Amino acid sequence: MNKKIISGLAALAVVFAGAGALPAGTFEGFSLTASAEESEIVNSGECGADLTWTLDSEGTLTISGSGKMWTFMSFDQPPWYAYTQNIKNIIISDGVTNIGKYAFYDCRIKSITIPDSVTSIGEDAFSSCTELTGVTIPDSVTSIGDGAFYNCKSLESITIPDSVKSIGESVFTYCESLNSITISDDNNYYCVMDGVLFNKEKTQLVSCIANKQGSYMIPDSVTNIVAGAFRGCENLTGITIPDSVTRIGSDAFWGCTRLESITIPNGITKIEKYTFWNCKKLADITIPNSVTRIAQSAFAKCQSLVNVTIPDSVTIIDSYAFENCQSLENVTIPDSVTSISHYAFAGCQNLAGVTIPNSVTSIDRGAFGYYNYNYGPYQKMDDFTIKGYKGTAAETYASENGFEFIALDETADKYPVVKSAVQGRQFRLKWTAVPNAEKYGLALYQSGKWRVKVQFAGNVTSYTSPKIKKGTYKMVVCAKVNGEWDTSSINKRAFTVTITE
């Protein structure tokens, strides 16, 4: 044998002889775990009255001790927050009794085992742990807080033990890889059916898995759709809500971007904030006459919504309620409404005007007549028209914002106000709605006479012409109310469209 090799082996023998027995995790003198030098303690501190934490250089966060973890009031309050992008593994010692709010927000862990000593998982405890694929929840846990696993995009499945008595809102929202939620029949508080989480009696719909496809019919036992229940279910195209439902929580259908239609049942008294926010394909919505309030951003960014009829039960339209409904052309505001909050209809650039009843006593800034290109700063719309009554909030708002005001008092004319645009050999018209209009008619002035060329249903407030010849055309839009065409001031109201190509 080579003398150098023999000499090296002898030296190793001396080292190991001095060290005593081989430590666990070694094989023939070679360590299978990192050395002390390779996994140094990076930082440490307290995270509860009797709890400490350490983070090593390998990305392992260890929570040691016994008792409750502190509740952190924001995602950046945990003392290890600065290291979240480096935390790859979390060890929670037996003896820890809860996982605090925001405790492991945005950590880069792939799995987590929670010890049997833990009884509660706090709000947003694992929120945005986007690489987390699996979690083991022990039978000791009785409550799971709001958003506990929110935006855990890689989480594929989860089993909720029999011990759980309370599950918060939006717990599994945006868990886009979640294929199944499993709950034993022995759980006395919750059950799962077709990927949807309910309370045991199926009166509360708690959460739907994010990747649920197509249409879904809610069971008629349900009375309450919990806040955020369908949030981020981007593949749902239709929802049938039974008449048994009397409450739909905030954010319930937030971001259901393929949802095309929905009927809100009678019995709902308030459309909660953000209920249908960013339902981009929602083109048809029926609001029942049981609703008295439309809350903040309830229909904001419903970009396909063209017509909205607000029932005469509604008294308050809150801020941003229909903000950035970019296709909205017609809205009917009943004389039950008393308050329209700021930016309620801002960003509705296809809305040429609005009729405001004298019941409205308060219109806040930017409620109508402003648009924001690519969601930038709001700018005033040209030629926006407000119809209302003299001495009311409608006239005041029009005056303060520099919009045209048309009085609807008994002696005033009642007619559509038209905006026109030309593109090539076609023109497009948009006009304000006339209350109780049965039909609209487009008339051209030809050979010294007005001739009706096209008629429209009373709920239509726009028209795009076929290609026509070069020339200047004098025209007017009239409304038919109570069986008669309103031709008052017809020549004064007439406008021209010029085709140059």
Image: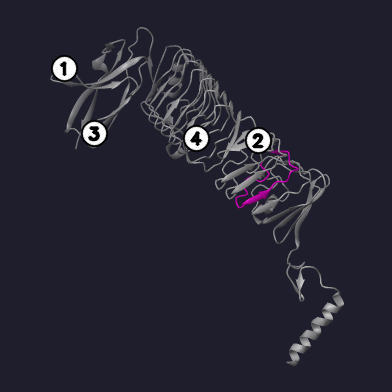
Mark 3 closeness class: few <14, some 14–19, many ≥20 residues within 10 Å: some
Position above or below: 12 against 274: below
Residue at the extreme front of the image, as rendered: 185
Tell me if label 4 and label 2 are in contact, CB under 8 Å.
Answer: no
Q: Residue at x 41, y 31 (%)?
A: 283
Residue named by callout 3? 426
Numbered badge on residue 449: 1
Measure the alpha-carbon separation of dots 1 and 4.
56 Å
Numbered badge on residue 216: 4
Residue named by callout 2? 190
Query: Residue 303's x, y, as percent?
Result: 43, 34
Q: Residue at x 69, y 52 (%)?
A: 112
Q: Is 166 placed left or right of 390 in the picture? A: right
Q: Could you tell which of marks 4 and 3 lies nearer the N-terminus?
A: 4
Where the C terminus falls, by quadrant?
A: top left
Task: Tell me if residue 130 is in the magenta stretch.
Answer: yes
The mark total stands at 4
